[in-house]
Image: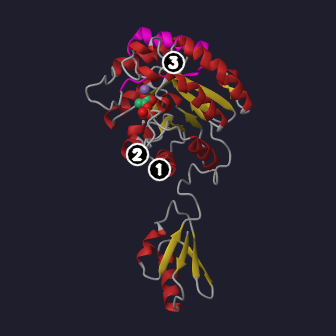
Amino acid sequence: MIVILKPHPSDDEVRNIEERVRDLGYEPHTIRGEVRTVVAAVGDETTHQSLETLLSIPVVDRVMPVQQKYKLISRETHPDDFVVNVGGIPVGGEVFQVIAGPCAVESQQQVLEVAEHVKGQGACLMRGGAFKPRTSPYDFQGLGEPALEMMARARDAFGLPVVTEVVRESDVELVARYADMLQIGARNALNYSLLEAVADTGKPVLLKRGMASTVNEWLLAAEYIVKRGNRNVVLCERGIRTFETATRNMLDIGAVAIAKKETCLPVVVDPSHAAGRVDLVEPLAKAAIAAGADGLLVEVHPCPEKATSDQAQQLDFDGFTSFMEHIKPYIDLAGKKFGPINR
Ligand code: PEP
Ligand code: MN
């Protein structure tokens, strides 16, 4: 941290700041200029109190961080890509993964059919909602534990690890018993006690960006999980809420590039919830690959018009087959290896 003082501080004022910096556990290094004086505070900001408390002293003009606040996931400290192992499937690094499955689990037959189809097309992980965070309390809320059992059976039948959302703290233990990766949805993206609870399971976490979260808030949410000792975090951009209504959420491709640059964590993109309509899923997925994404989360349903949720955005089987065919050249161009190659 750098503490910048107001013009022409007295010797006493500078000494006082140096003392306060020392009290907070840092070593002060003062540079006195003609007008301005700055005090560089050297020390580990993860283990010491924030120097921002010094802002209450009248002579202090600004306190500026020199390191990112998300230290544990920052490329500054971890230059190499971190690869997250999800039930034996690597996510991140050189490999590109597609996570596919229905918005919500509706029946055993539905998940078995979807698992078979998406695996046949090269997806290595399966998604499906057992607990659905719906905008309206009158909409389908998910089948709960029976849905988790159905996905576990599909995993056993087809060898596809399961990614599923946990919406409340009291369900974390239950969901972790069945899932290979716990999803934190956009609506819970800044629910810090839930983040800590999923972190403590030790399971990989798919962390969606909140619909009104800044990139900084998203990355700091990931830092909450890693700070608990669980480094198995995959970031997921799924679009944010803006004034635009032509898409369901505005896919923030810039955020994907920034997250890849600033952090060592894998970043996947969910074009389904960003698009909100089936015809835009493929172009958004191609843009995500070009921006450096490590994978995609795509909704697939055997019969989207009969789905209990998100009918307009789920690909049917033919749609998913052609989607996978069309994105493969983009994955090659991005210099990534498509998932199944590594199995
Ligand atoms: C989902 O993936 O099922 C979901 C509800 O997405 P989001 O949290 O991004 O809205
Ligand atoms: Mn959905």
The image's mark for residue 315 is 3
What amino acid type should be assigned to the residue bearing mark 1? Glu
The image's mark for residue 190 is 2
Instruction: Report the Cα–Cα distance between label 2 and label 3.
Output: 29 Å
**Region rendered in magenta:** 106-131
Q: Which residue is mark 1?
A: 217
Would residue 89 be visible to someone looking at this image? no
Rendered location of residue 266, percent (x, y): 60, 38
Residue lying farthest to the left in this orientation: 138
Q: Earlier in the sequence, mark 2 or mark 3?
A: 2
Element carrying mark 1: helix
Which part of the image, by quadrant, shows the C terminus? Answer: top right
Would residue 20 be visible to someone looking at this image? yes
Cβ of mark 2 under 8 A from ligand 1: no
Residue 236 vs 102, above or below: the answer is: below
Element carrying mark 2: loop
Relative side of 79 to 130, left or right: right
Residue 4 vs 77, above or below: the answer is: below
